Image: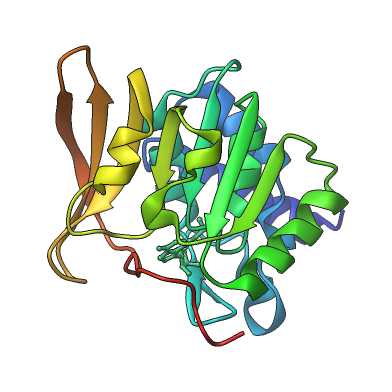
Amino acid sequence: MTDDLAERKMQFMFALRSKGVTDVHVLTAMEKIDRGLFVKGLFADRAYEDTPLPIPCGQTISQPSVVGLMTQALKVSPRDKVLEVGTGSGYQAAILSQLARRVYTVERHRRLVAGAKEIFEILDLANVTAFAADGSFGLPDQAPFDRIIVTAAAEDAPGPLLAQLKVGGIMVVPVGQSDAVQSMIRVVRTETGFDYEEIRPVRFVPLVEGMARDN
Ligand code: SAH
């Protein structure tokens, strides 16, 4: 590793901590999974900045500190089966693979699924499976889940996803009526219903129903 790269990676970890990512397991996973693999082309040299960046299909890889804070809010334990909706680059799923027993991730753009699968293979992440599917309906075949993370913004926590959460399970999802005003919420399924808690304001690309047609 050149000194410059080492320095940028140190800054990357520093930015995570200074934005409130304090969970040591999350930090360790984010130190291990190299974001540089998930950002290609023009923006590759900005992979270690704490900023969202463009990926193919007009989507974005989320801001690292937001990935860290969402992952932290999800409270993943090593026995958990996790569903991610919105694979995108595959970065968030790769982080989750370090913390959970099993990770399923779904994405509506086939091209993104293919790109993410390639990286999972390079990294030898045997506990992650990516599917091309409309994640607004979850993944009924593998349900129920201990944890669900949605990395695209919905108006509300989607009903089919709530239904696929185990009792005691946690879902983290950005919700909002517009692109500009969204907030990340944590939903806990109890014996009798759901508890909602607002965590922080965020800004995500929208959750869109149906498979994408552009590939
Ligand atoms: N978690 C990603 C970033 C996701 S950006 C990462 O780590 O890189 C949000 C992604 O959600 C986009 O790729 C978008 O195509 C996808 N998406 C939006 N609506 C969806 C849906 N209904 N089902 C599956 N994926 C969806």
> x%, y% of residue 111?
66, 75
Between 3 and 103, the residue placed more toward the observer is 103
The picture quadrant where one finds residue 180 is: bottom left
Residue at image coords 65%, 64%: 113
5 sits to left or right of 153: right
Residue 52 appearing in the image: no
Residue at left offset 37%, top offset 56%: 136
Most foreground residue, 47 or 157 = 157
Residue 156 locus on image (x, y percent): 18, 52
In which quadrant will I find the C terminus?
bottom right
User: Please, is residue 73 above or below residue 173 in the view?
Assistant: above
User: Which residue sits furthest top?
Assistant: 191
Instruction: Identify whether 7 is placed above or below 126.
Output: below
In the depicted structure, whether residue 92 falls above or below residue 42: above
Q: Quadrant of residue 44?
A: bottom right
Residue at image point 54% right, 54% down: 106
Question: Is 110 positioned to the left or the right of 108 in the image?
Answer: right
Say if 104 sits above or below 38 in the image: above
Residue at x 55%, y 81% (from the top left corner): 57
